[in-house]
Image (tube, coloured by chain):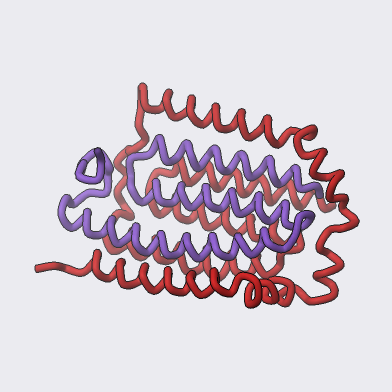
Chain colours: A purple, B red
């Protein structure tokens, strides 16, 4: 199996994740789509690390840790927004927008 | 045989990703996401990254997705089938942006783009021999605790800050 096949798959997943962030209104699903984008990038790192060096896999390790931290803080923000506005639909609140 | 397995895993990954974007309830989206992450772990195994495949299942599909599930159930969104996909101009904008990004990525990934990479790093110098020498975990652990020790320690600090921040944000202030 060539890394180029995995790179194509990674590009497709990244594009689907971007579409989800733009198209959905539910904040939790937007978060899930951001995770999808991170996952696509991880896949590209792993595909190339087999030929370029082990550093790619190390970087994936760090990306996963940062994704965990980001999910914890983001979901805490969503919970406190929900307490205030009784909704997770991004059209119903605007204080995080410019 | 290898490419058949790869094809099945890749189609589950893409189907799961589409299910996340177009799923009706948040729970359905989450389960599609877990399917997508699981088949990504299968692709990692095919790329000889066994340790990352295990981490992907345990940490990503196991811990992070369960955190999302907790929040969906805590906020009682499981039966919230309100249609929240944007329509009209926004969806046109979305398809325009993603089409642009997709075209850009595809033009970068086209065979002539990576041919240079594959000739300068021919498959004979792949890390497979190193994996056979040091073991699956050893090959990651050795640079992680030598060259990248500072980054590793700072990741621990980041996780600590994230936990404290999440507690401070989600705590009731009254």
Return the x and y of residue A50 as percentages of the image width and height: 77, 57
User: Where is B153 relative to B66, above or below?
Assistant: below
Question: Number of callouts in the render?
Answer: 0
Classify residue B45 as left or right of residue A65. Answer: right
* Of A41 and A79, the residue lying toward us: A41
Residue B157 percent across, percent down from the top left? 43, 73
| Residue at the image position 18 percent from the left and 58 percent from the top | A83
Instruction: Say which quarter of the image contains residue A69.
Output: bottom left
Image position, residue B170 (x, y; %): 24, 66
Relative vertical location of residue B130 with respect to residue B93 in this rendering, above or below: below
On screen, residue B68 above or below A15? below
Q: Position of residue B69 (x, y in %)?
A: 39, 62
Which residue extends farthest left? B174
Location of residue B128 (image quadrant):
bottom right
In this view, the residue farthest toward the right is: B124
What residue is shown at x 35% (from left), y 32% (from top)? Answer: B86
Residue B51, quarter of picture: bottom right
Q: Left or right of B16: which side holds B114? A: right
Q: Nearer the viewer, residue B100 or B71?
A: B100
Give left or right: position of A62 versus B173.
Answer: right
Placement of the C terminus of chain B among the 4 image quadrants: bottom left
Point 81% across, 63% down: residue:
B127
Is residue A44 placed above or below A72 in the rendered structure?
above
Q: Which residue: 31% across, 52% down?
A: B79
């Amino acid at each position: 199996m060539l890394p180029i096949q995995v790179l194509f798959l990674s590009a497709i997943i990244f594009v689907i994740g971007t579409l989800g962030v733009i198209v959905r209104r539910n904040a939790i699903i937007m978060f899930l789509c951001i995770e999808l984008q991170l996952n696509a990038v991880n896949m590209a790192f792993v595909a190339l690390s087999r030929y370029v060096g082990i550093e790619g896999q190390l970087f994936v390790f760090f990306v996963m840790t940062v994704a965990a931290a980001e999910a914890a803080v983001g979901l805490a923000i969503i919970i406190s927004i929900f307490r205030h506005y009784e909704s997770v639909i991004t059209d119903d609140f605007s204080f995080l927008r410019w | 045989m290898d490419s058949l397995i790869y094809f099945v895993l890749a189609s589950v990954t893409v189907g799961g990703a589409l299910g996340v974007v177009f799923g009706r309830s948040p729970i359905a989206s989450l389960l599609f996401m877990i399917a997508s992450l699981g088949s990504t772990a299968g692709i990692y195994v095919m790329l000889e990254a066994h340790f990352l495949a295990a981490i992907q299942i345990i940490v990503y599909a196991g811990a992070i997705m369960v955190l999302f599930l907790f929040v969906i159930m805590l906020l009682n969104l499981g039966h919230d089938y309100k249609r929240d996909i944007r329509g009209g101009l926004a969806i046109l904008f979305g398809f325009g942006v993603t089409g642009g990004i997709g075209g850009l990525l595809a033009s970068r990934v086209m065979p002539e783009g990576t041919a240079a990479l594959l000739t300068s790093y021919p498959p004979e110098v792949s890390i497979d021999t190193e994996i056979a020498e040091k073991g699956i975990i050893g090959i990651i652990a050795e640079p992680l605790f030598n060259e990248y020790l500072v980054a590793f320690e700072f990741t621990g600090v980041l996780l600590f800050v994230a936990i404290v921040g999440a507690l401070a944000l989600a705590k009731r202030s009254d």
